[in-house]
Image (cartoon, rainbow, N blue to C red):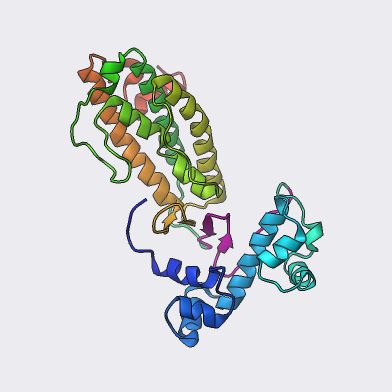
Amino acid sequence: MSTSTPDPLHRLLNAVLDDEHRSLGDMAAGAYTSPFHFARQVRTGSGESPVALRRRVVLEQAAWQLQRGENVTDAAFGAGYDSVEGFSRAFHRAFGCPPTGMPPQSQRGHWLPAPNGIHFHSPTALYVDAGEAHEQPAGDVVGLLVRHDLDDIDALLVAARGLSDLEYRRTRLPGSHPRSWDGPDESIAQVLRHLVVSKEPWLASIAGETEPDLTGPDGVAELAERHAVTGPRWIALIRDIDRRGAWQDRVLDALCDPPESFLLSQIVAHELTYSTHRRQLVRWMLAGAGIDAGAGQLDPDPILWHRRRIGES
């Protein structure tokens, strides 16, 4: 998403978990340092030796694959073991059951105990649990802001339905480009598209899905349909993060180029910030098209929105 340099933790983890780096010497070479210094850096940063960290995360990956239908032989060799028997012994020691007896995802997760909260999450994201008490709980304020954001996007899509295609696509703010990787936000159509699709890459990265296709029809009806799918997924994600107290957990996002690590709290704050800005951009543009998008049901004030939602006004 941005092009900043990957953080030091990510650089070390890349060397530990690279498919080609199966020995300490390979890992150290991948990080351009000596085995001694590499092992010391990884243990200092993670509380776990590079070899033990790699073995555990690889077994978590194998468990994840087995729960999704992978056969034991492929999981064993994919994990770098020379034999199915060796893999089965290591798996049984780690999980307390043989690979063939791994419970389904609905009954058991694929993570093993870790001193550092670093876990395999999916093929495209390594999930890093903060593993410590958090200074500030998110509370209901985040939930309220997230729900308001989604409802307000709905309301703006409804307000734009009456526009002609010419008014909908007219360039109204030349040069507007709030986020470098998104493309311009110069028309109502462009801003509404970005409001609707902006959360999809985060959802995909956290869920371990492939990079989403952010193209497609951008008519109001099509965007409303897309928003109706993304919105509930976004709410479910926020509720899960809050339920687990996981706001300081970290995702290493392989959909970025180069990959970067993000706190879950940073991701949500980022989306709320840019979405708020864009919702106000749309209001300004709708006003230029003759639609009052700042009064009544379209008033953006979250206080008034919440009162309407709970039936106080």
Judging depth in this view, the residue of 47 and 100 nearest the camera is 100
Report whether residue 44 is seen.
Answer: no
Tell me, yes or no, whether the highlighted magenta stretch contains residue 114: yes
* Start-end of magenta stretch: 107-131
Q: Residue at x 53, y 42 (%)?
A: 237
Locate residue 90: give its quadrant: bottom right
Magenta-drawn stretch, dominant element (helix, strand or loop): loop
Relative image position of residue 14 (x, y in whole percent): 48, 68
Quarter of the rendering occupied by the C terminus: top left
Q: Nearer the viewer, residue 80 or 121?
A: 80
Q: Is residue 294 above or below residue 40?
A: above
Q: Is residue 153 above or below residue 131?
A: above
Number of numbered discs present?
Answer: 0
**Which residue occupies the foreground of this view, 85 or 233?**
85
Relative horizontal placement of residue 29, taking residue 273 as reference (left or right): right
Nearest the eye: 217 or 107: 217
The answer to if 198 sits in the magenta stretch is no
Q: Position of residue 28 (x, y in %)?
A: 48, 80
Task: Look at the picture and state if 77 lies above or below 262.
Answer: below
Q: Is residue 204 visible?
A: yes
| x then y, percent, for residue 253 | 46, 55
How far from the left and from the top, in percent, is residue 232? 53, 33
Kindly give the residue lying farthest to the left in the view shown: 174
Residue 299 in the image: above or below residue 252: above
Which picture quadrant has residue 76?
bottom right
Q: Residue 309's image quarter?
A: top left
Q: Residue at x 23, y 14 (%)?
A: 290
